[in-house]
Image: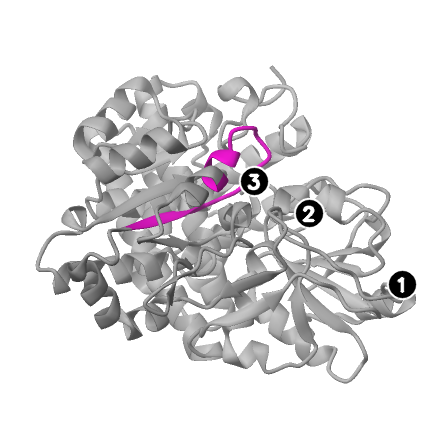
Amino acid sequence: MNMFCFQCEQTAQGKGCTMQGVCGKKADTSNLQDALTSKLIELANCGEKNDTNTKLLIDGLFTTITNVNFDNESIQKFIDNVQKNINCTSQFDIKTVWDCDEDIRSLKSLILFGLKGIAAYAHHAKVLGYKNSEVDDFFYEALQSISKNLSADELLQLVLKTGEINLKCMELLDKANTETYGNPSPKKVTTNIEKGPFIIVTGHDLKDLALLLEQTKDKGINIYTHGEMLPCHAYPELNKYPHLKGNFGTAWQNQQKEFENVPGAILFTTNCIMPVKDSYKDRVFTTSVVEYPEITHIGENKDFTPVIEKALALGGYKEDQKMTGINGGDILTVGFGHNTVLSVADKVIDSVKSGEIKHIFLVGGCDGAKTGRNYYTDFVKLTPKNTLVLTLACGKYRFNDLDLGEINGIPRLLDMGQCNDAYSAIKVAVELSKAFNCSVNELPLSLVLSWYEQKAVCILLTLLYLGIENIRLGPTLPAFVSPNVLKILVDKFKIKPITTAEKDIKEILNR
């Protein structure tokens, strides 16, 4: 065995990658990421609790998320920087977790992988100048717990606390995004590409997009979002730029095909980079925590001049290009965050009471390449016309170009935003439960989630912390959840795997 990694949904044979990551990560890169994780745990145990070390913990954890950093040199440099701030001789090797009792390993993995997801959200908030001391302190507490000999009961409490802290972190990021760029409002976004020079921006970071929009102003370059950047069109301070034109392509896992010889520059701001093919390697740029060998990296100065010059040199398409989503639609509607949805809450409540809205489905989460994910397309297509479908994260690309119609002027398909905007869905659910004087579990609301990487893990833990029951999860259950831990989740929270779209919808509506 040259490596061991089972942190994402696509892990080999549903057990773990041992020779090379299915994501494209080589064994030496995986081992360096394990070494970085080990050093971060040592730093949490031995370093001072200060802003410098907190930033190292957050950015270091983010660096090890699936599809973020494939560059050994930059990972080693990060390890060296962490080492400089470790003030004791205590050592820890994360491999001891992979080799321990399977239930302890499972619980510690839930904490660690959930913590990586929180780190991503904390990173984005800090970039905008927002932080929460309780969130920051938890990075130390959680990493320390992974190195301790705690009981299964103690670790289970920390698993749920991970969900609690993630809720606070998502709330913080929501505040950071909306106070900086305004409350999202509904916006129709085209998938068609205009002729002329253009830049594709992918990832999650709103500030990177804002900086690029400002630097490309009046330069004759159009900007297109990709993947999880799609919701950016809904923010007033971003969509005020007329050269923010639309959205390029579909979900992240299709990039190797969709970026093939594309005559535009591509900027990766966060995770979801796949091994870069030679046919577009010369036009890819990374920034923030994302790095890839032999790819130009834009540093902390955020001078996007190389990206701009490449876009101008490539020149873009000679003619306008007609492009669509996977179902043939060319208009994507975004901007249904909690502020927008709650502004029509009375109409939703009245429609539920009158029976015009029979049920609300939240169908969202991460997308991926594994077969079986067409379940989510089928599920949404089969939802009755008297139901609403809330969605968020990149899983929505399976169906977000569908026109599902309206109920009393409310679109049946409501795109709530990025994966971190699960906070919006939670806020809406809580407010509806107050209006109906019942618990969230008693609402005519069902969660059907897809997962891929570690941000989906922390969101799931948040839902469990809130006591949300009957969550359907797919396309597979996590490899790092042991049978005994799975039994706890099933017994306590009634979590269940997806089956078929037809069967699950029938069961949900007849319960």
Q: Is residue 193 above or below residue 5?
A: below
The x and y percentages for residue 146 are: 36, 35
Query: Callout 3, which amino acid?
Result: Thr
Q: Is residue 258 above or below residue 6?
A: below
Which residue is tagged 3? 66
**Circle 2 SS class:** helix
28 relative position to 399: left or right: right
Q: CA distance from mark 1 to mark 2?
A: 29 Å
Q: Nearer the viewer, mark 3 or mark 1?
A: 1
The x and y percentages for residue 470 are: 24, 37
Q: Is residue 464 above or below residue 126?
A: above
326 relative position to 413: left or right: right
- The mark nearer the N terminus, 1 or 2, is 2
The magenta stretch spans residue 370: yes
The x and y percentages for residue 365 are: 44, 46
Q: CA distance from mark 3 to mark 1?
A: 30 Å
Query: Callout 1, which amino acid?
Result: Leu
Q: Which residues are magenta?
A: 360-377
Q: Which mark is residue 119?
A: none
**Circle 1 SS class:** helix
Residue at left 19%, top 66%?
350
Query: Callout 2, which amino acid?
Result: Ser
- The mark nearer the N terminus, 3 or 1, is 3
Q: Nearer the viewer, mark 3 or mark 2?
A: 3
Which residue is tagged 2? 74
The x and y percentages for residue 3 are: 59, 22
Q: Quadrant of residue 238?
A: bottom right
Count of numbered marks: 3
209 relative position to 379: left or right: right
The front one of 242 and 276 is: 242
**Circle 3 SS class:** loop
